[in-house]
Amino acid sequence: MNDKTIIFIFIDDDTQPVAKVVSPVSFELDTRKLTDGEHVLKIVSKDPAGKEGIRKIPFVVRNGPAVAIEGIRENAVVDGILPLMINAYGKGDAKSFIIEGSETPQSIPAWVWILIIGFAGWAMYYLIRFYSIPV
């Protein structure tokens, strides 16, 4: 008589399990065989008495090149001409690293400009006060 729990591993709504293993187990999920996007890992366990336990884990696969966009956000309301900066880059492979295009250029945030202008204004004020002191 088998006294171990059997685990069935499903991806999305597939009727055939990806794996049928005996507990405890270490399992490697190869996401290269899945399309990019949202998926659900469904794990069904069945104990020796026949009772079942189910756990669903949603996850997102992103094996293809990553796409970064600056100039628009999700669900944004826009009008007129919209300047966009779009970058797409892949991870390469484990043996080589692709430097060209691997970093997404971004514009300087407004708070940095405010900080620079504030510091420059303070420095100018300090210099004017320093040189206007009568000797």
Image (cartoon, rainbow, N blue to C red):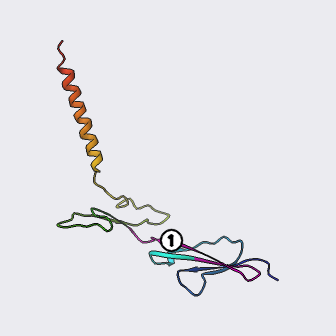
Q: Nearer the viewer, residue 23 or 44?
A: 44
On the image, which quarter does residue 37 sit in? bottom left
On the image, which quarter does residue 23 sit in? bottom right
Q: Inspect the magenta stretch and tell me whether residue 132 lies in it.
A: no
| Tag 1 residue | 59
Q: Residue furthest right?
A: 1
Please provide the residue range marked out in magenta: 42-66
User: Which image quadrant: the C terminus?
Assistant: top left
Q: Residue at x 34, y 59 (%)?
A: 104
Q: Provide the major secondary structure of the magenta segment.
A: strand
Residue 9 placement (x, y as % from top left): 61, 79
Q: Nearer the viewer, residue 82 or 35?
A: 82
Mark 1 residue element? strand
Q: Residue furthest bottom?
A: 15
Residue 73 placement (x, y as % from top left): 31, 64
Left of 101 or right of it: where is 28?
Answer: right
Q: Nearer the viewer, residue 29 or 98?
A: 29
Q: Is residue 13 above or below residue 68?
A: below
Q: Is residue 33 above or below residue 102?
A: below
Q: Is residue 66 above or below residue 8?
A: above
Q: Residue at x 55, y 85 (%)?
A: 14
Tell me which amino acid carries mark 1. Phe
Residue 2 placement (x, y as % from top left): 79, 81
User: Which image quadrant: the N terminus?
Assistant: bottom right
Is disc 1 surrounded by few (<14), some (14 to 19) or many (20+) residues within 10 Å?
A: few
Residue 50 placement (x, y as % from top left): 73, 83
Q: Is residue 94 above or below residue 44?
A: above
Q: Residue at x 52, y 74 (%)?
A: 31
- Number of numbered discs: 1
Left of 111 or right of it: where is 16?
Answer: right
Q: Inspect the magenta stretch and tell me whether residue 47 lies in it.
A: yes
